[in-house]
Image (cartoon, rainbow, N blue to C red):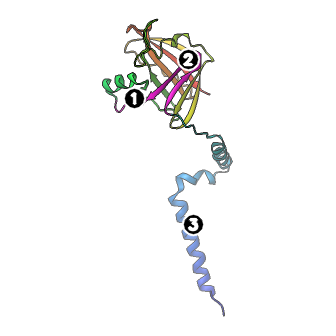
Amino acid sequence: MKIFNSRSSTLAKIFLLLFATNIIILNWEDISWFFNRNYAIKGIESIVREKEEIIYYDKENGIEINAIEIIAPLIIPDNDSDGAIYDALKRGVSHFPGSSLPGEGGQVIILGHSAPPGWPNIDYDWVFSKAETLKPGDEIKIYFDSRLYTYEITDSVILEVGQDVPKYDSGEEEIILLSCWPPGKNIKRLGVRGVLK
């Protein structure tokens, strides 16, 4: 006795075809690269490479700069008000609201206080006091959301108070450490730039 006759077999094939078509249509944004031969291989390689390379760290958000012996918490302010940023700066270095977060691409801006020589180490007022001694090739390590982002310093710039941080349009994720300059004076700003390694 046949369980399926030719009519029910045809209906089953049509159902499977419609089901597969709906799955493809509903997930097109996620799988469209698969149907382009040029991108399919790259897409598969990037998925495999990404899974192999992701390392998670059991660390709080923070910054480490070995060249100037800095380890400090990285604080993400609750909002972009001056009060929220100043509160963040008392507890470590502050992400500048409106700039990219590590891993998003674009420009990550990190704010930190600087203090004159001999200033007591209180409330992270001193954290970027030696930032002007950083040189190309030195590394900035950012721990964010259990991931490590390592930036290599390329250059630095002195800015006027209120001057916009320059955009470099290099296509690379970059970081700018921003602090008062000279240390402890609110005369100008020092920007130290690095690119993601």
Residue at the spot of label 2: 69
Q: x and y percent of residue 41 in the render?
A: 68, 48
Residue at the spot of label 3: 20
**Secondary element type, mark 2:** loop
How far apart in space, not on screen, are marks 2 and 1 (Cα)? Answer: 26 Å
Q: x and y percent of residue 166 in the render?
A: 47, 19
Please name the amino acid that badge 1 sits on: Pro
**Secondary element type, mark 1:** loop
Residue range (magenta): 60-79
Residues 5 and 193: in front is: 193
- Which quadrant would residue 6 be assigned to in this image? bottom right
Residue at the spot of label 1: 97
How far apart in space, not on screen, are marks 3 and 1 (Cα)? Answer: 44 Å
- Which quadrant of the rendered structure holds the N terminus? bottom right
For residue 72, above or below residue 146: above
Residue at (49, 33) in percent of width and height: 60
Is residue 75 on the magenta stretch? yes
For residue 79, above or below residue 66: below
Residue at (50, 28) in percent of width and height: 62
Residue at (57, 33) in percent of width and height: 148
Instruction: State the mark number for residue 150.
Output: none
